[in-house]
Amino acid sequence: MKAFVAKQGFVRNHVVPKLGTALDDVLIQVKAFGINRPDLIQHSANYPPPPGVTDVLGLELSGVVVEANNDKLVGEEVCCLVPGGSYSEYCSAKWGTCLPIPFKGTDSDRFVKSAGIPENAFTVWRNVFRDYDLDHLSSQNVSMLFHGGSSGIGSTAIAMAKAFGVSKVIVTAGSEEKCDACLRFGADVAINYNDESEDGKLDWTTKAGKVDFILDMVGGEYLNQNL
């Protein structure tokens, strides 16, 4: 099969992955895949894959299940998170990391639209919402602060927060253009941490005020400021 391999590039005769033996193993014919920063770093030989993971790049994809140990899953159109291997014609995966494609089958772009969903959606779900009582989130007057609001993770967090009824979503971003984008995504407040105007001289922590939850992709010096 055709594949794109770390440190090598395009390969025409790469071995097709085999279906695993577990009941939740599936083999997916890849229709589209997402591109993430770890892929670029891995291709430059600075981010080796975990032991036992394929050298084919790619962490997310969309496609059709063509083989499965549970026959009922064959033919399902899914988008999926994988440890590696999505830059290829076929990719093995676990059913538990697959999501139904959220677009109708008549949409010719449904696979392309879906391929970039899993990495961001799973990350935000696991780190933000998994441990919340989602049925009562809208009535709890919860406020959340997301750093990097215009990033893939940030924009997904904004959308999911508003969908679950979070009362106030605050984000930080590095320019007015990015802040405007965050407001269009649904954020209630967008803070430009590079603002040098008179108003911008206030620290972003002062502008954000007290919040119930912070999603921080920066770390480092932000830790004390978050606290």
Image (tube, rainbow, N blue to C red):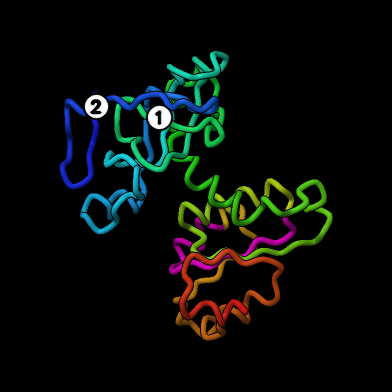
Return the residue nearer the eye: 95 or 132. Answer: 95
Return the residue nearer the eye: 161 or 121. Answer: 121
Residue 80 placement, left or right of 90: right
Q: Residues within 10 Å of mark 1 (few under 14, many from 20)?
A: many
On the image, the x and y values in percent for residue 191 come to: 55, 70
CA–CA distance between discs 1 and 2?
12 Å
- Residue receiving disc 1: 92
The amino acid at mark 2 is Val
**Residue at x 43%, y 17% (from the top left corner):** 66
**Residue at x 43%, y 27% (from the top left corner):** 20
Residue 146 position by quadrant: bottom right
Picture quarter with the N terminus: top left
**Residue at x 47%, y 45% (from the top left corner):** 119
Is residue 223 visible in the rendered structure shown here?
yes
- Could you tell me which secondary element the residue under label 1 belongs to? strand
- Residue receiving disc 2: 15
- Above or below — where is 176 with respect to 52? below
Residue 203 placement, left or right of 139: left
The amino acid at mark 1 is Ser
Q: How many marks?
A: 2
- Above or below — where is 226 with respect to 85? below
**Residue at x 44%, y 17% (from the top left corner):** 67
On the image, the x and y values in percent for residue 177 come to: 44, 62
Magenta stretch bounds: 166-182
The reply to whether discs 1 and 2 touch (Cβ–Cβ < 8 Å) is: no
- Of labels 1 and 2, earlier in sequence is 2
Picture quarter with the C terminus: bottom right
